[in-house]
Amino acid sequence: MKSLRLIIVLVTAFFCFSGNAQAGQNLKKETVKVWGNCDMCKGRIEKAARAAGTMSASWDVDSKILSVSYPSTGSSIAKIEESVAAAGYDTGNDSASEKAYKALPECCQYERKTPVQSNKN
């Protein structure tokens, strides 16, 4: 009886681990430039990226690079950039609306590189 339980546990563990390995193969990893200034920006940027469906999000204050991993069927880099822009931060491919940018704390209002090209309010 103990042998049967051991076999069941081993078979169950095998299927759980092989399922997780397959799920990991469907993760996309990408990076994108996001303008910001400080650790408060870091928290907001990462939170916005997670809200767009990322499994992980890490923004580097010095390089201004957001590294994300997300399920290929659950999100996209465009969706992530849109969410970050909605939080007030310009990205490499999307601009925050003037309203979202102005809502940032003063210390988080970075120098914008280009005029806002978006029609978002």
Image (tube, rainbow, N blue to C red):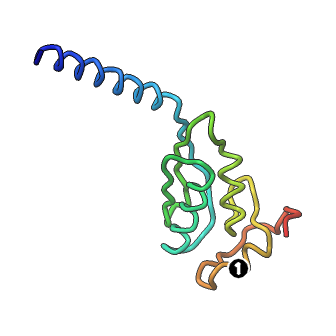
Residue at the spot 68% in from the left edge and 75% down from the top edge: 111
Left or right: residue 45 versus residue 93 is: left
Label 1: how many Cα within 10 Å (few below 14, some 14–19, many 20+):
few
Residue with the most extreme right position: 119
| Mark 1 residue type | Ala
Residue 7: x percent and y percent? 20, 15
- Is residue 93 placed above or below 74 in the rendered structure? below
Residue 120: x percent and y percent? 85, 65
Residue at the spot 45% in from the left edge and 32% down from the top edge: 24
> For residue 109, what is the image quadrant?
bottom right
Residue 82: x percent and y percent? 72, 55
Kindly identify which residue carries mark 1.
Answer: 103
Between residue 105 and residue 6, name the one nearer to us: 6
> For residue 86, what is the image quadrant?
bottom right
Left or right: residue 61 versus residue 5 is: right
Residue at the spot 79% in from the left edge and 75% down from the top edge: 99
- Is residue 8 placed above or below 68 in the rendered structure? above
Between residue 89 and residue 73, name the one nearer to us: 73
> For residue 36, what is the image quadrant?
bottom right
Callout 1: helix, strand or loop?
loop
- Is residue 100 placed above or below 4 in the rendered structure? below
